[in-house]
Image (cartoon, rainbow, N blue to C red):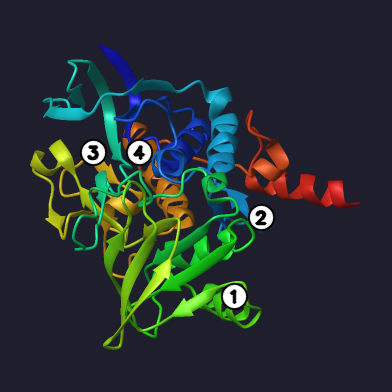
């Protein structure tokens, strides 16, 4: 039986950052993840994808962000149960939980933090005849290694952030990038849309809208695609077709834990601490939903911070916690009061 203060389900960026925030509060964490290594989608799907909205990093590769988070939490020595899925949960009379994985590993915890991202997932595939035949033969649903597309002709389809970001990034890798979207308007960040337009005018991206890919051609490997552009059909030669239409999320066994679920996401109380309808079980990051929810990594970091404060207060009733400023105290702890911390800052400035 593995004992811990907080059992985190999901080793993505939100789950990993939870370890850091809990560590500052002297709370021990253990993480369960169905993948064989930490990092979640960032490691499994796009380790080489640049991320642009992490504070302090104009751009950071997804894999590097995971490495940095792992380095940040190393000092708190979290435990990991990897390549196993949290399957069953039992709430005991004392309010603690026993969580058992699909391989029978049991975890006894005082609080559960579900940080499962999109849960188990699979790509949303466009309805195109024979697309399965071309999978791994020119059709790729994820960009794990951009070097695969070095000096190749590629066609990306989609209108969200992934389609825009990869079109921008691969414009300096592939010999030719074509971005196809069924509408003239994109769903991604305005800055990315503007960048794509700039690259289009510079001749580095071919932009075709409104249009859809309707056919794939090639004997052993993808050689060209057929598109429907406002009723007109034409053929484009390409080495790779990358449809980026998002992921179909599945909560897996967690969906049967008695949690309140809305559109495949777990409802939480965002006005307080991101707790679910079951006391002691929290949901943070992309796996949760509440009014105004934004599925951003930095939002998951914020939710993890407030959740850890809530767990600390529940486990230490009546004990006043003095917020510590790591800019002054470091992470080993600062025993002074807030006033002393502020004096230390003033002294440092002087």
Label 4: which secondary element: helix
Q: Nearer the viewer, residue 261 or 302?
A: 261
Percent position (x, y) of residue 183? 34, 83
Residue at the image point whose x is 42% and y is 52% from the top: 300
| Distance CA(mark 1)–CA(mark 3) | 44 Å
| Distance CA(mark 1)–CA(mark 4) | 43 Å
The disc, 2 or 3, on the residue closer to the chain's N-terminal end is 2
Query: Eyeballing the image, is 63 above or below 59?
Result: above
Label 1: which secondary element: helix
Label 3: which secondary element: loop
Which residue has dot 2 on it?
56
The disc, 3 or 4, on the residue closer to the chain's N-terminal end is 3
Which residue has dot 4 on it?
311
Label 2: which secondary element: loop
The disc, 2 or 1, on the residue closer to the chain's N-terminal end is 2
Which residue has dot 1 on it?
195
Which residue has dot 3 on it?
280
């Amino acid at each position: 039986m593995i004992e811990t203060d907080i059992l985190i389900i999901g080793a993505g960026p939100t789950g990993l950052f939870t370890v850091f925030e809990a560590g500052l509060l002297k709370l021990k964490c253990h993480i369960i993840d169905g993948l064989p290594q930490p990092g979640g989608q960032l490691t499994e799907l796009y380790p080489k994808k640049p991320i642009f909205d992490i504070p302090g990093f104009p751009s950071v590769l997804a894999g590097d962000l995971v490495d940095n988070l792992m380095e940040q939490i190393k000092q708190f020595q979290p435990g990991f149960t990897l390549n196993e899925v949290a399957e069953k949960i039992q709430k005991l009379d004392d309010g603690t939980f026993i969580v058992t994985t699909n391989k029978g590993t049991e975890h006894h915890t005082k609080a559960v933090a579900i940080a499962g991202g999109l849960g188990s997932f699979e790509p949303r595939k466009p309805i195109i005849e024979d697309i399965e035949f071309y999978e791994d033969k020119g059709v790729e649903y994820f960009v794990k290694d951009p070097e695969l597309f070095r000096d190749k002709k590629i066609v990306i389809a989609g209108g969200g952030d992934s389609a825009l970001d990869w079109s921008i990034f691969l414009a300096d890798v592939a010999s030719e990038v074509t971005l196809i979207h069924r509408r003239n308007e994109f769903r991604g960040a305005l800055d990315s849309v503007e960048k794509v337009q700039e690259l289009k005018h510079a001749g580095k991206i071919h932009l075709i809208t409104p249009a859809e890919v309707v056919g794939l051609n090639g004997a052993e490997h993808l050689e060209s695609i057929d598109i429907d552009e406002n009723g007109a059909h034409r053929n484009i030669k390409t080495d790779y077709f990358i449809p980026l239409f998002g992921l179909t999320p599945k909560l897996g066994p967690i969906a049967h834990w008695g949690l309140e679920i809305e559109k495949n996401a777990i409802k939480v109380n965002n006005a307080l601490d991101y707790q679910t309808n079951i006391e002691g079980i929290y949901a943070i990051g992309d796996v949760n939903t509440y009014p105004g929810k934004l599925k951003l990594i930095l939002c998951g970091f914020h939710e993890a911070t407030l959740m850890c404060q809530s767990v600390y207060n529940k486990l230490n009733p009546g004990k006043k916690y003095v917020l510590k400023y790591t800019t002054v105290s470091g992470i080993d702890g600062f025993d002074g009061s807030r006033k002393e911390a502020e004096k230390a800052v003033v002294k440092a400035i002087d």
